[in-house]
Image: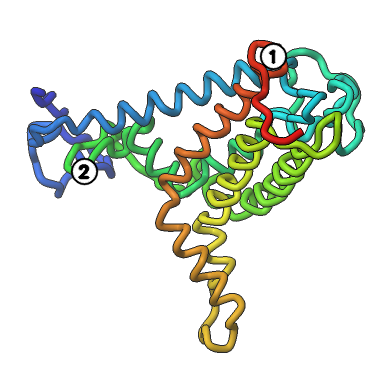
Amino acid sequence: MSAAPVKAPESGTTGVFSRGRAAIAARTLRTDQWWLPPLVTVLGFATFIIYATVRSFQHNYYWVAKYEYLTPFYSPCLSKGCVEGSTHFGTPIPDLPHWIPLGFLVLPFLLLFRLTCYYYRKAYYRSVWMSPPACAVAEPHAKYSGETRLPLIIQNAHRYFFYIAVIISLINTYDAVISFHSSGGFGIGLGTVIITANALLLWAYTLSCHSCRHIAGGRLKHFSQHPVRYRFWTVVSKLNTRHMQLAWTTLGTLMLTDLYVALVAAGKVTDLRFIG
């Protein structure tokens, strides 16, 4: 892949083209396919965003009354326009127009939690913001202000979005417990397994968060004096090493869970029952 020429440094620039930096005329001297990982990341993000957007605005096929399956994209469903039975926490919100998703109270916080996640920052900084797109590849930005100005200053609120994500994970856990009930009583189906597995993986992703690790063991001078927090910190630290994998896995399980519930709700697929 031929390297594109780099423009001359401008006065006052603070990026890789500023005066005092190595004056290399090529964007990069790398000969490998360095652009492939950023491209795959963009395609992965785009797939999830398009799917989630379409499903969030459909306002249908999100609840299976017979087996009490509720998709995470519509949980909790608090509007009076929600399908009967899907409103586990009441209907304090009036009927919504079609251009407002039924999960509008949760979706923005989930989006902000993921956008400010330390791994996702790395992923979209390289793939979307191109800052930089890869190691030893010059970024196209002449100036860089870090996370001190809008919109990137919002990244500093990640720890607060974490607390909301914990509440949402509790709601997903409740939905998983409900999925063990059917019209005939206790039951387990393929949907139960998928919803429960998704809830567990969401817990793993949430608890593997860097903010959670800091909450567990941050500001402790002597671990020996706080054995419970130390034990929790060690568990979270082990999960933290898999944060990247969990970040991508949960994007996939969210889509899989929603797709399966939608297919069953639409009558396109018959739920495979193991018990009940």
Compared with residue 241, is residue 66 higher up or lower down, i.e. above or below?
above
Neighbours of disc 2 within 10 Å: few (<14), some (14-19), many (20+) = few
Occupied quadrant, residue 65: top right
Q: Residue at x 45, y 23 (%)?
A: 46
Towards the viewer: 242 or 257 = 257
Question: Could you say whether the residue bearing mark 1 is in a helix, strand or loop?
Answer: loop
Structural distance between the alpha carbons of marks 1 and 2: 41 Å
Secondary structure beneath disc 2? loop
User: What number is the disc on residue 239?
Assistant: none
Q: Position of residue 196 (x, y in %)?
A: 64, 41
Identity of the residue drawn at 17% across and 42% down: 136
Residue 108 showing in the rendered view: yes
**Which residue is drawn at the image coordinates 70% and 12% (left, top)?**
266
Whole-percent x, y for residue 273 in the image: 68, 29
Circle 1 crowding by C-alpha within 10 Å: few under 14, some 14–19, many from 20: some
Please, is residue 154 above or below residue 191 in the view?
below
Residue plotted at (53% across, 66% down):
214
Residue tagged 1: 58
Residue where numbered disc 2 is placed: 135
Of the 4 image quadrants, the one containing the C terminus is top right
For badge 1, the amino acid type reads Gln
Q: Position of residue 63 (x, y in %)?
A: 76, 23
Amino acid, disc 2 = Cys
Q: Position of residue 153 (x, y in %)?
A: 52, 46
Q: 58 or 252, which lies in front?
A: 252
155 relative to 100 in the view: left or right: left
Left or right: residue 191 versus residue 15 is right
- Comes first in the chain, label 1 or label 2: 1
Quarter residue 61 falls in: top right
